[in-house]
Image (cartoon, helix red, strand yellow):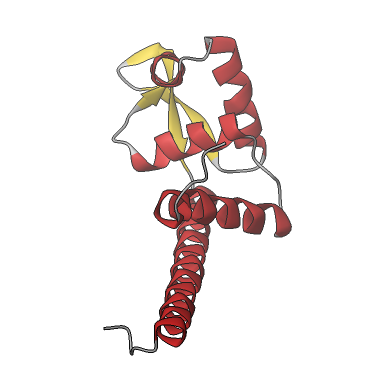
Amino acid sequence: MRRFSDNETILPRILRETMVALIRREGADLTSRQFAVFMICYVEEGPHTVRGLAERTKLPKPAVSRVLDRLGAIGLTRRVADPRDKRSVLVACTAEGFTFLKLVRSLLEEAAQTTLHIDDKDADKERDLKSQTTGTNGV
């Protein structure tokens, strides 16, 4: 079985540490579907509709609707009537959602710093070991 290089595992490790930190905190956990829809709503240009989110995620509209029900119940999004088409509903961002997005960003940054710092330490150890075994100073 192929072993991944350290460079190939940096982003997965950052994601892992971020997700672990998110589930350890107080508050509701998000499923991967909920997290994906949340991120689309907050990071991609809107307005967002159930139909558009279904197309973007390749999920059925009822599944997206359930995701939005959950995100709405925990205050991360809300549905509002489309002023141009009263039959359509738009997904609106909330103050709580922006606060959660800031938390996600800070956890990502913290995980990145920790992961990259560990990689730097490992590289230093490897250089030290190599210099000890070759009798050089890394030259």
**Which image quarter: residue 55?**
top left
**Which image quarter: residue 49?**
top left
Q: Residue shown at 60%/35% (left/top)?
A: 71
Closer to us: 78 or 121: 121
Instruction: Name the side, left or right, on which 30 lies relative to 83.
Output: right
Closer to us: 138 or 42: 138
Q: Residue shown at 49%/73% (left/top)?
A: 122
**Which image quarter: residue 6?**
bottom left
- Vertical order, 30 against 99 (above or below): above
- What is the total number of numbered labels drawn onto the structure image? 0
Residue 87 location (% of width, % of height): 43, 9
Instruction: Name the side, left or right, on which 46 lies relative to 67.
Output: left
User: Which residue in the rendered view is the most extreme toward the front?
Assistant: 134
Q: On the rendered image, what quadrant is the C terminus found in?
A: bottom left
Could one spot residue 122 in this view of the protein? yes
Could one spot residue 100 in this view of the protein? no
Closer to us: 81 or 56: 56
Residue 126 location (% of width, % of height): 46, 75
Residue 42 location (% of width, % of height): 40, 42
- Vertical order, 114 against 81 (above or below): below
Instruction: Name the side, left or right, on which 106 lies relative to 85.
Output: right
Q: Residue shown at 46%/69% (left/top)?
A: 119
Closer to us: 21 or 121: 121
Q: On the rendered image, what quadrant is the N terminus found in?
A: top right
Instruction: Name the side, left or right, on which 73 lies relative to 125.
Output: right
Residue 107 location (% of width, % of height): 52, 62
Q: Residue shown at 63%/21% (left/top)?
A: 66
- Vertical order, 79 against 22 (above or below): above
